Image (spheres, rainbow, N blue to C red):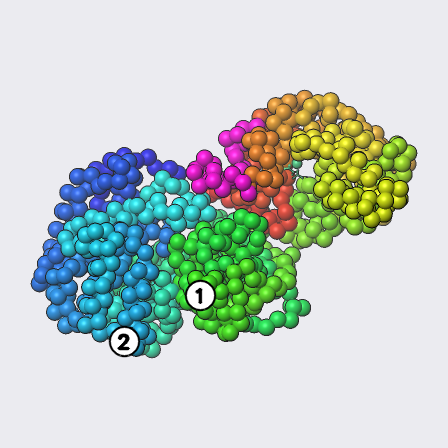
Amino acid sequence: MSVRAQPATKQIYFFDEGNTSRDVLGGKGAGLADMTAAGLPVPPGFTIVTQASLQYYEDAKSIAKPLLDELDGAIAELERRTGKRFGDSNAPLLVSVRSGAKFSMPGMMDTILNIGLNDETVHALARLTNNERFAWDAYRRLVTMFSSTVFGIPKDAFDDVLERRKHELGVKTDPEIDAESWKKIVDEYKKIVVAHVGSGFPQDVREQVVRAIEAVFNSWNSKRAVDYRRFNRIADDLGTAVSVVQMVFGNMGDDSGTGVAFTRDPNTGERVLFGEYLRNAQGEDVVAGIRTPERILDLERSQPKIYAQFVEIAQRLERHYRDVQDLEFTVERGTLYMLQTRSAKRSAEAAVRIALDLVDEGLIDRRTAIARVDARALDQLFHARIDPAEHFDVAAKGLNASPGAATGRAVFTADDAVAWAQRGEDVVLVRVETTPDDVHGMIAARGVLTAKGGATSHAAVVARGMGKPCVAGCEALEIDRRSKRASLDGVAFGEGDWITIDGTTGNVAVGKLRLIPPPAKLPERLATLLSWADAERRLEVWANADTPEDARKARELGAQGIGLCRTEHMFMQQDRLPVVQEMILANTPEARASALARLLPFQREDFVGILEAMAGLPVTIRLLDPPLHEFLPSLETLLVETTELRITKGIDSPDYKARDAVLKRVQQMHEQNPMLGLRVCRLGILYPEIYAMQVRAIFEAACDLVQRGVDARPEVMIPGVGSVREMQITGENARRVAGEVLKERGCSISYHVGTMVELPRACIVADDLACDAEFFSFGTNDLTQTTYGFSRDDAENSFIPRYLEQRILSDDPFQVLDRRGVGSLMRTAVELGRGARKDMKIGICGEHGGEPSSVAFCDQLRLNYVSCSPYRVPIARLAAAQAALGTLE
Ligand code: PEP
Ligand code: MG
C-alpha cells in the first residue's frame, strides 16, 4: 500500500502514549511502544512518525518548524523524565537516534548512538561513570558514526587512525586502549572532520540531534536501502520513522554487554533461543560483525539472573506477537534493557517449520500458517550442494551462515560483483565483512564469503533473507583489497579465480566444484504445509517440462499436468541434430520427407517417456517454435570453416562443397529480426510436413501407451498464432493427422488442439481464435517482448537494469508480470475467449507462471492453471493459496 505525504498533526509519540501502530511508528517504534505497554524494561524515548519523513522529502529535505517545535518539546519532556539535561555539563542526557520502517530492513538505514556528547559533556560522563576511558570511547564512537552518516566521511578514514594507534600501542582489541589514547584518537578524528567539512565536529547537541534525524530520513533513500526494497518488493513511499531513545551502555565493564537474539533458530526453526552476546560492547559491534561474539547461552553461566529475565521476556514477546521475534538488548551494569523486538527474518526451512509448530502450539491457525511463509523463499529449500563425488581440499572453514553451495569467480567489491555478473559470470563476493553498502553486490553474487562476523552479522542476515549461500567469519581468510588477492590458510587466489563455498557446512574450497541440483522430493514439513495450501487454492499448478525426468520431478513436487513441453530441445540432442539439419537443408520435398521419417521414431520415443511419466494427467505438447537457423551452425562459424576448407582442400573438394552448401542455405535463411520472422506457427504453415510429423509422433506414442493400458493424455499446442487463419490451417492439419493415426491404430483418445496466446494481436482477436482453439495458454515471455517491444534476449542485460534504477520500471517485466500492459491484454483475451467458448481452459506457461505476484494476478483473472518450471511448482502452489486467501495480491 502506498501512503501519500500529508502534514501530520501530531508527529511525535512517547513510547508510553499508547500508540502502537506499525504504519505510524515503523516496526522499531511500534515494538518499543508495545514492550513499554507490556511493562518490559525499555529506556524512555519517543518516535517521530513515518509520515514526517515523507513530509521532509516533500519539503526539499528540510525539517519544518512544527516538527522542530514538537521535537524541542519532546526533548524537554525526556529531560524531565530522566532527570538529565541535553548538553548539561553535570548530568548530560545522551540519546540514540534510530531508524525504523514499517517492514524491517536490517542494517539498511542509519542509526547514531551517543548523541549529546561534546567536548564538555564527555567530562561529565567520565565523572558520572567514574570511567574516563569509557567516556572517551563513547565520544569517538559518536564522532565516527555521526561524521560518516551525516557528513559522508568514509569510515575507513577513522579506522585507519584507530589501526595505526593500536599498532603503536602494541594492542589488538579496543578494550585494551586507555583513556589517554582515546583522547588523542578523538583529537585526530576531529581533525579528519575539519579536513573534510571545513568546520569542527558539532558541539551544539541540538544540532547533533536534528542532523542525525535528517540523516536517518535521508538513509531511507540511500542506494543500499533502495536496492534492498527492490529486492524485497517493499514500497518506496512508506518512509521511515525515527526513534530517539535514552542511551544505555553495554560497554561499561564486564557486567555490561549487548546482544541480539532470536526466539527460535532462524536457520532451522528449532525452538531454542538463538543469538549472540558481546560483553563490554555497544550494539553496533554485534550487528556490524566487528568482533566475533559469544553465544547467548553463555549468558546463563555468567549472568544467570539476567539470562532468566531475558528468557521470560523473549517467551512473552513471542506469545504476544504469535511469531518468532528478533530481539536486541543491552545490559548496563547488571540491568537489562530491551531495545528492539520485531518479527524475525528466517530461512525458508525455518519459516515452514515455525509455521507448522505455531499451529501445533495453538498460536495460529492453518490459514495464518500459509500466509506466514514467503512463497518466493521456498526455492531456498531446494539448495544446490557440492557433488559428493568431488574430491577436494577444504581450504578453510567458516560459519555456515546461510545454506546451499555456490561456485563462482572471486570478486572483492560489491561493484565488481555487479560488473562481472553483468558480463554473465557467476561470482562469489569475498569481503572482510559486508556492510549495508554491499547489498547490490550480494544480489549479483551466487554466494558470499566473509572473514569476520557471526551468525547474526550483516552478511549472514542479508544472505539468508535472499536465500543465498553464505560462509561468514572465516578467520583463515586474508584479503588484500588493493591487489585484489586473498588467501585461505596460505592457499592463494585472486580476482576472477574460481572458489566454492558451502553455506550448509561452512566449507570453502579454491576451485570450481561440480554442484548438484537439489533433490526432487518435497521435504516432509513443506509437503504438509502445501497440502493445507492445496485445500485453499483455486488455480491448478502445472509444470513446464521437456523430458521424462523433468516431468517426474514436477509430478513429485505436485504438478497437476504439463502446461508446456517444448519440442525443440528434443531436436537439439546430439543424435538428432544431423537429421534435423538434413531436413532443413533438403532441396526437395522427398529429401525433407526422408529426414522427417527418420526423426519420427525419436520424437515418438520422447513423447512416450513424457506421457507415461504423466499418466492420467494432461501433457501439453507445443509444436516446433524457433526459427530453423537455430539448428544450423552460425553464419560466422560457417564463413570461417568454408574459408579454411577452400584454402586447405580446394574448391572442388567434397568437404568444401558440402560446407559451402550449408553456408548458402544459412545465408538464404538469414533474417534481420528472427524473433519476428519465420518461426512459431508460420513455420508450420510454410513447412506443414514438420508439424505433421510431430503430431503423428504424439498420437502414435499415445496409442502405444493406451494400448499398453497407460492413460496418456496429449494436448496439442500451436505457438505464436496471431490471426484466425493461422489457427484454422494449423489446427485443421493437426486434427487431420491425429485422426489418421487414431484411425490406423483403432484407438480412441480425447485430446484438444489449442494455442499459445503470445502476441498482442492474438489477445485482441481472441474471440475469433477461440472458435478453433480449444484452449489458450499465455506465453508471457513472448507476449511481454511483443507488448513492450523489448527483446527478451537482450533487454535484461542492456537497458532494463538502468530502467529499474531510474524507476522507469518498477520490476523487470520478464520476471514479474506487467499487469497494466501485458495484463490488460491478457484480461481482454480471457474475456473474449470465454465469451466465444464458455468454460474454455486457460493457463499461462511463460516464466511468470512460477512468480508469486504474477500467480496472484492469474488467480484474479480466473485462469485455470499456471505452469512453471518443476522447482517452482511448490512456490506456485503456495502463492496460489495465498492469492485465494487474499494474503497475496
Ligand atoms: C512464452 O513465450 O512465454 C513461452 C512460454 O514460449 P517460449 O518461451 O518457448 O517462447
Ligand atoms: Mg513463446
Residue at point 27% right, 57% down? 145
Look at the picture and state if 156 lies above or below 373. below
Which percent across, then down, holds residue 244?
A: 23, 53
Residue at point 59% right, 59% down? 384
Within 8 Å: ligand 1 and the Cβ of disc 2? no
Q: What label sits on residue 480 in the rendered view?
A: 1
Q: Is residue 871 visible?
A: yes
Q: Amino acid at mark 2?
A: Leu
In depth, the one of 105 and 590 nearer the eye is 590
Q: Is residue 661 magenta?
A: no
Which percent across, then down, holds residue 159?
A: 31, 64
In depth, the one of 479 and 30 nearer the eye is 479
Look at the picture and state if 753 lies above or below 402. above
The residue singled out by tag 2 in the image is: 169
Answer left or right for 628 relative to 557. right
Part of the protein shown in magenta: 797-825
